[in-house]
Image: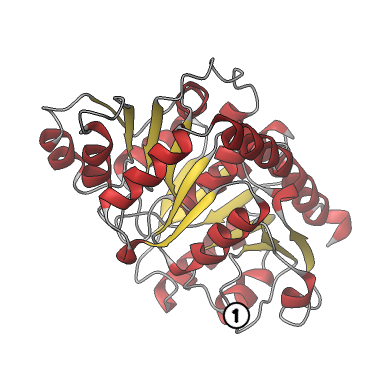
Amino acid sequence: MSRLLIRADAGPAIGAGHVMRCLALAEAWQRAQAGPVTLAAVDLPPALGQRLREAGVELASVPGPAGGAADLRATSELARSSADACVIDGYVFDRGFQHALRQLATTLVVDDGHRVDGFDCDLLLDQNLGASEAWYAPLAPDAERLLGTRYALLRHEFLDAAPPAARTGRRVLVTLGGSDPAGLSEATARALAEHAADEPPVDVTLVLGGSNPRADAVASALADLPVTIHRDARNMPELMAHADIAVAAAGSTCWELCHSGLPAVLVVVADNQRDIAANLDAAGAAISLGWHADLDAAALAAAARRLLAAPADRAAMAKTARALVDGQGADRVARRLLARAAPSSR
């Protein structure tokens, strides 16, 4: 039996993406009957903690600041006492942090192509389209590199998702991140729901993540509009199957959208999302509108309406997107990590 320790955080400032993709990996580890999983965090919203516990993941609290000396001491003690493998997912964990944990357990680092100071790990994962050996080989020369959408981490509910509903050309799913750091949800949903007399009405579904600090205020502000709101949604595959397009932040949700074959209008709300959005746009799998501060809700709504009115474009985009992500990435990563963590290989 091999035990897995995950070190990741979630919250209003950094969103939920790091923890949610680690949840997908934890589920794959459990499917492989490898052993127990513990997630250690400085910050973790209660709703997300509950979701992890329901998935059979044990939780441990470590002292902040994230990536600091106290964090490293506490995480190292957890690794020393209860881990054969360790996953590190976050931007604050430098080479020193990675090196210390690597002395205690087989270590996998999750990256998004933003880091330039190098890596000290056994395995390196970048699940994004365009992740390249040319970038990572000099930065992680002795790591096994798992690069590209073949390794996209999808949670179990996407693996058995129902096929898409019949297309109507009217249904938009708005999902702008676990915490919506750019604060776009309310204005975007409002711009889509309110329409001119010569425009057809749009069926708007808005997802507010469990880390969104303004969820109550947004729901209240939209109460007078025909917007269906889901908070901390547990049925994202169903919501994606029911939609015709999505307006989404260009984070890890992109790989869920691709697997679901849902055409998307993407907004960049964090620096590490720039390449994701640009590469998906170039591949014909989504439309990128670029950096959020350069946009307004009216522009987002207009782009969504144009895509709704173009069924042939939507069909081509869905086919391209679906071919990028087969849904087996988490199992591939778990198998490689488990193989490296086996006592005979250490």
Q: Nearer the viewer, residue 291 or 305?
A: 305
Q: Secondary structure at mark 1?
A: helix
From this viewpoint, which residue is outermost toward the front? 198
Residue 333: percent from the left, percent from the top?
Answer: 73, 49
Quarter holding residue 209: top left
Using the rendered image of the protein, determine whether residue 251 is visible from the camera's viewpoint: no
The amino acid sitting under disc 1 is Arg
Residue 267: percent from the left, percent from the top?
Answer: 42, 55
Residue at screen point 13% across, 28% down: 223
Vertical order, 333 against 146 (above or below): above
Vertical order, 323 against 72 (above or below): above
Q: Report the label total.
A: 1
Using the rendered image of the protein, determine whether residue 224 is visible from the camera's viewpoint: yes
Residue at screen point 72% across, 76% down: 135
Q: Nearer the viewer, residue 161 or 1?
A: 161
The colour scheme used to paint the residues is: secondary structure
Residue at screen point 17% across, 34% down: 219
Residue 192: percent from the left, percent from the top?
Answer: 28, 36
The residue that mark 1 highlights is 95
User: Which quadrant, please, contains the C terminus?
Assistant: bottom right
Quarter holding residue 218: top left
Apparent side of residue 262 relative to residue 208 in the rendered image (left or right): right
Residue 74: percent from the left, percent from the top?
Answer: 46, 66
